[in-house]
Image (cartoon, rainbow, N blue to C red):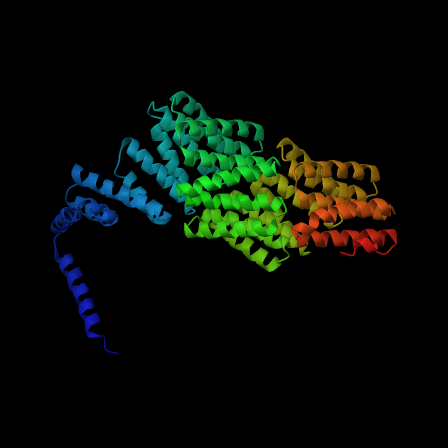
Amino acid sequence: MPIPAESAYLFRHALLRDAAYELQPPGSRAALHGLTIELIETAFGAEAESLAEELAAHARVARSAGDTPELRAKEAHYARIAASHSEQRFHPEQALALWSQVAGLEVGVARLHALSRVGRNAIVVGKASQGIDAMQQALAEAEQSDNRGSQANFFRQLSSCLHVIGKTHEGERFARQAVECARQSDDPAVLAAASAEMALTLLRTGQTQQAGELLDEAFLLYTQMGNQREAARVKSNMALLHYRAGRTVQALSDSAEALQCQRECGNVESEAHLYQLRAMILWRLGRKQEAHESLLKALDMHRKVGQRLRSSETLTILGSFERAFGRELEAERAMQESLELSREMGDRTGESAVLCNLGNLYMQQGDQDRSRACLEQSLCLSQACGDRRGEAVTLGNLARLEATAGNDDVAEPLFRRVIELHRAMSNPTSEGIALADLARLHARRGRTEAALEAFKQAIHLLREVKDTVQEGAARCSLAAMHITLANLEAAQSEYEAGMALLRPSGDQSVMRQIRQEIEDAADAAGIKPPDWTGD
């Protein structure tokens, strides 16, 4: 097939151009690149920065003929601008390469800044090892100076990176060092950032009271400085703390305030994260459809800005939502995609969370072997990472698996351990869920008094945190126990109260569980399920 004349001309022209370039001696080539920089700067003036990446490449080749301070400065200058542009356009791979180029050219504070950006972008694209190496290199160089502010910043950034890859204990150590250095720096911005990072560390390990104190300190500092963007970021972490502590209404209020501010500031990444947090809060409040819509909005925004880590987190939550709606294929698809992303990025904490959710999904499907395999992998990862919250959640699912398999002797000590862990971390929602599970086990074994006491404690905690779905489920389980004891009046009262809480949620997985419990209870009592359980 003949090549069109215009295409043939362009092809030959490109070949001639490349051949002519290769015929030039290396010194002449370098000089041409240097001349190109001068011509572009003269022609474009200040707008030459729009061609920063190209100019940095020209400067790099020009330096091959003679590494002059002027050319070195030009390459660093344009590479830095190009790296910042890449970050703004959410191209972390490109930003990583350019910041690495800058780090090799600069010295002093400018080099430390470049290394910190290398670390951050490496983490974002899943190159955890490279990111940690860059941060540790920056920290080693910062420690040689007396600048406490710089040291605090690098301790803080290294702590954040370590948490991403699941090294929780090491991350906490560096976060504490960051706060210590920040207090010695007399720089309120440095102290605010270090306090906020330390608060997140404490939240991860369940130390909510200390986390709240540090968040209050960071918020006050940022407010006094007039830094609305960072104050809003801290406010979103306050919402997370309230959510974890069961103060759901306050969490929703704080997240709305933070979302409005981040939208006004044009901070897309933080806005997306807040939509994700609001989805979890709305879900707990029983506003399931709103929660699902908020989560899909978050996922779309994460994908648009190239945030793979956040996309993985959001997909894990989406899988849980889909499972609750009874859409099991969609749930497994979302979780598998999240698992692949977590493994690609070396995010062990995220991988543990996804495996735990997959284990729960397979348990509901009746596939105990796959469920156990996922949960045991999740437990090993969370323990290796020092993730106490993740460990407690996975142990709770393992206990439920053992109970489902009829191994109550194995399940009971696991439930007690889960309750201890959540109580120590001030996590009343998860403590209440675990108490309800223990109550169900007592009821199966005929321990009526122990079951009634555990149900009472569980319902109290779940009502306090306004978790209507779990409170409703616990009340319906209590109703099932009353059916086995032929206390039908008490059973009807608890069942109707529980269903009044459950119906607005539309949570199909919980509804199926309740129906099965009622049928089993009626069968054990030798009666038909009462008419009032028909829904």
Question: Residue 208 lies in what quarter of the image?
Answer: top right
Q: Position of residue 14 (x, y in %)?
A: 19, 63
Q: Can residue 198 be seen in this view?
A: yes
Point 34% across, 24% down: residue: 147
| Residue 78 screen position, x and y as percent | 24, 43
In this view, which residue lies farthest toward the bottom?
1
Check the image and report above or below for 250 versus 38: above
Query: Who's the residue at 48% across and 44% down the image?
Result: 273
Identify which residue, 516 or 229, lies in the foreground: 229
The x, y position of residue 113, in whole percent, is 33, 35
Q: Is residue 388 visible?
A: no
Look at the image and tell me in which quarter the C terminus lies: bottom right
Q: Quadrant of the N terminus?
A: bottom left
- Answer with left or right where residue 11 lies relative to residue 349: left
Q: In this view, does 126 lie to the left or right of 414?
A: left
Q: Which of 309 and 259 is in front in this view?
A: 259
- The quadrant where residue 246 appears: top right
The vertical placement of 475 against 333, above or below, is: above
How far across and down, in percent of the image, does residue 135 sit? 38, 36
Instruction: Determine whether 140 is above or below 97 in the image.
Output: above
Residue at the spot 66% in from the left edge and 52% down from the top edge: 507
Q: Closer to the camera, 409 or 259?
A: 259
Disc tally is 0
Q: Which of 357 and 499 is in front in this view?
A: 499
